[in-house]
Structure formats: structure tokens, C-alpha cells
Amino acid sequence: MAEFVVRAAQAGDARAVAEMFAAVAEERDGIATEPPVDIEERTALFAHSAAGSFVAVARDRIIGMLHVEVSRYGFGEFAMLVERGWRSRGVGSALVQAAVDWARGRGLHKLCLEVFAHNAAAIALYRKSGFIEEGRRVKQYRRADGQLWDSIVMGLALWPPVQGFACHTDTARRG
């Protein structure tokens, strides 16, 4: 396996993240957004929301991204995407771990997410990371072709805090 690093996102990553986002949207099955994706609009959005985001980088190329949206109620909700060729190679696990460490370091009591019910690989990753299913949204997402897809809501309690916790945002992974 090739080496990759997970680090905090920077505004300068925005264009590469937007292009990866558009490529994943083209697959039409893992994220809610479907093509066409306005790359310029997404670049501006990602540049503005770099705080609370992490990227996975291999050979100076962004291969994954996770963004945590922090609620004023003490929890964070995240969304993640990984380039197709890098799935099932530890990128998602490393991104989720970076988010968990970051959230704990900021005193959040919980992380949550929403995933399509048919995305077995993502659900398995989240379960492996300690997330539990909290509910199902039946026929929640209308797709461009008219299909209605279910989603599963998952959460991970971060409270009480882990004793001796240290926050690490830069994580290297070797296979």
C-alpha cells in the first residue's frame, strides 16, 4: 500500500477538493450531490469551510476529505468522501480517527453522520470506528432519476472524555 498523510485542510486545498468532490458525485451512489457540480462554487465553499476539515494526501494529491460541522449544541456532524481508487485502503479510517481526535480536543460530546442505507462499506467503516445506528430516514433523498433512497443516521458518543487523551491531527499511514 502507498503512503498517505491526513492533515488539517487549508484554503489552498479547495480546488483539489472540489474536483475530487465532482468525481465522486459522478459515481451517483455515495454522496447526495449528483452531477453536474459547479467546480468554482464548490471551490469557494470548501475554501470558506476549511476549518474543521481534514484531507488525506498521497504523493501531493488529495485523495480524501472529511468536514465536521460543529453545532452550537456541542455535537459535530460530518461528511466524508474518498477517491474511488483509495477506498478500502485505510483512508476513511484515518480521516474518521482525525475527526474523532479533533472533536474530543474541542470538547464535543458527540459526532454523528448520515449515510445511504445501501453503502455497506461505509456503514462497516463507521461501525468499526465505534458509531452506532441511531435511526433510519425512509425515502429521504430524491435522486435525479426519481428514486427515493433511505439513509441511516449514526452517532458516536465522545463523553465522558478519555483519560490521558492527546489530540493528533497529523496522522501518517503506511501499508
Image (tube, rainbow, N blue to C red):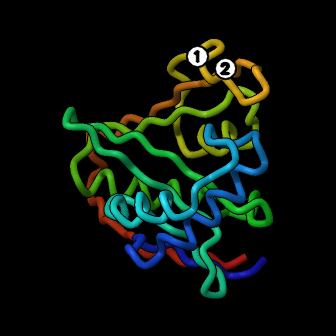
- Quadrant in which residue 87 is drawn: bottom right
- Say which residue appears at 50% left-offset and 20% top-offset: 134
Amino acid type of the residue that numbered disc 2 sits on in the rendered structure? Asp
Image quarter (top left, top right, bottom left or bottom right) of the C terminus: bottom right
Report which residue position mark 2 lands on: 150
Residue underneath mark 1: 136
Question: Callout 2: 10 Å neighbours few (<14), some, many (20+)?
Answer: some
Say how many tags the image has. 2
Q: Residue at x 45, y 74 (%)?
A: 7
Q: How busy is the neighbourhood of tag 1: few (under 14 within 10 Å), some, or many (20 plus)?
A: some
User: Does label 2 or label 1 sit earlier along the sequence?
Assistant: 1
Regarding mark 2 in the picture, which secondary structure is present there?
strand
Q: Which of 54/174 is in front?
A: 54
What residue lies at 62% left-to-right and 42% top-to-bottom?
Answer: 33
Q: Residue at x 59, y 24 (%)?
A: 152
Amino acid type, label 1? Arg
